[in-house]
Image (tube, grey):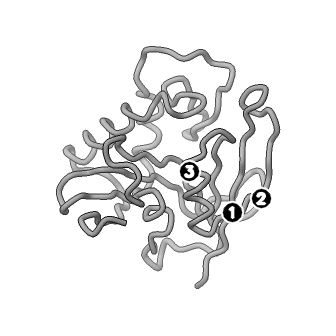
């Protein structure tokens, strides 16, 4: 990772400037997700896939509203400019594997700042002791080659494939990482 990039942990986001930057990055990355974040649903405060939704011109308001309540790792360039983030949940039970874990929900890097190791840096960041878990889980879609590459570099192992889960030919991939404590 570029030496000018630092990553910081946030237990919550109250700073309006940071919130605005997260919103900006989320909007830049919205349509790169499958399905786009702007068409995803929120149920019981959790973000869920809606794979049959059509791409829309709206922005990911509902997604942001749910995501901003989570914990964050934020990547800064020169300690002031936000270039990426990862939101996550701690101490949750993953419904697919019935295991207590940390769950990485959303990872976004500004398009202009990609290919600098930021995603891998976020995925390998050492959380504060009180937020560590023996297992970390996440998911992505089968055509998301850059994140799949970062997950593999970061020690994540493919745990399960839900074939044609998002659309014919687009699978949901579930990844798991065992953390040393």
How many marks the image carries: the answer is: 3
Q: Quadrant of the N terminus?
A: bottom left
| Neighbours of disc 2 within 10 Å: few (<14), some (14-19), many (20+) | some
The residue positioned 54% from the left and 34% from the top of the image is 33
Q: Nearer the viewer, residue 172 or 128?
A: 172
Q: Would residue 21 be found to the left or right of residue 44 on screen? A: left
Q: Position of residue 96 (x, y in %)?
A: 77, 51
Q: Position of residue 156 (x, y in %)?
A: 65, 64
Of circles 1 and 3, the one toward us is 3
Identify the residue at the far front of this view: 115
Instruction: Tell me: residue 179, above or below residue 43.
Output: below
Mark 3 lies on residue: 147
Identify the residue at the far bottom of this view: 181
Identify the element where label 2 is drawn: strand
* Image quadrant where residue 23 sits: top left
Disc 3 to disc 2, C-alpha distance: 15 Å
Identify the residue at the far right of this view: 163
Question: Mark 2 or mark 3, which is nearer the start of the sequence?
Answer: 3
Mark 1 lies on residue: 176
Q: Which disc is residue 159 wearing?
A: 2
Q: Quadrant of the C terminus?
A: bottom right
Q: Are marks 1 and 2 in contact (CB under 8 Å)?
A: yes
The residue positioned 69% from the left and 41% from the top of the image is 142
Question: Mark 3 or mark 1, which is nearer the start of the sequence?
Answer: 3
Identify the element where label 3 is drawn: helix
Instruction: Tell me: residue 134, above or below residue 115.
Output: below
Q: Which disc is residue 117 wearing?
A: none
């Amino acid at each position: 990772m570029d030496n000018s990039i630092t990553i910081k942990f946030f237990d919550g986001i109250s700073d309006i400037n940071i919130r605005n930057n997260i919103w900006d990055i989320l909007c830049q990355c919205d349509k790169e997700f499958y399905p786009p974040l702007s068409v995803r649903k929120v149920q019981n405060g959790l973000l869920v896939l809606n794979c049959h939704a059509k791409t829309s011109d709206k922005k990911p308001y509902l997604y942001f509203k749910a995501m901003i309540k989570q914990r964050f790792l934020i990547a800064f360039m020169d300690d002031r400019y936000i270039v990426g983030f990862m939101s996550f949940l701690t101490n949750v039970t993953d419904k697919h594997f019935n295991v207590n874990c940390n769950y990485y929900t959303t990872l976004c890097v500004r398009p202009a700042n990609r290919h600098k190791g930021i995603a891998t840096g976020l995925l390998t960041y050492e959380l504060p002791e009180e937020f560590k878990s023996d297992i970390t889980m996440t998911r992505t879609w089968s055509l998301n080659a850059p994140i799949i590459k970062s997950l593999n570099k970061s020690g994540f192992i493919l745990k399960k494939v839900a074939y044609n889960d998002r659309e014919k030919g687009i699978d949901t991939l579930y990844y798991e990482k065992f953390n040393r404590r």
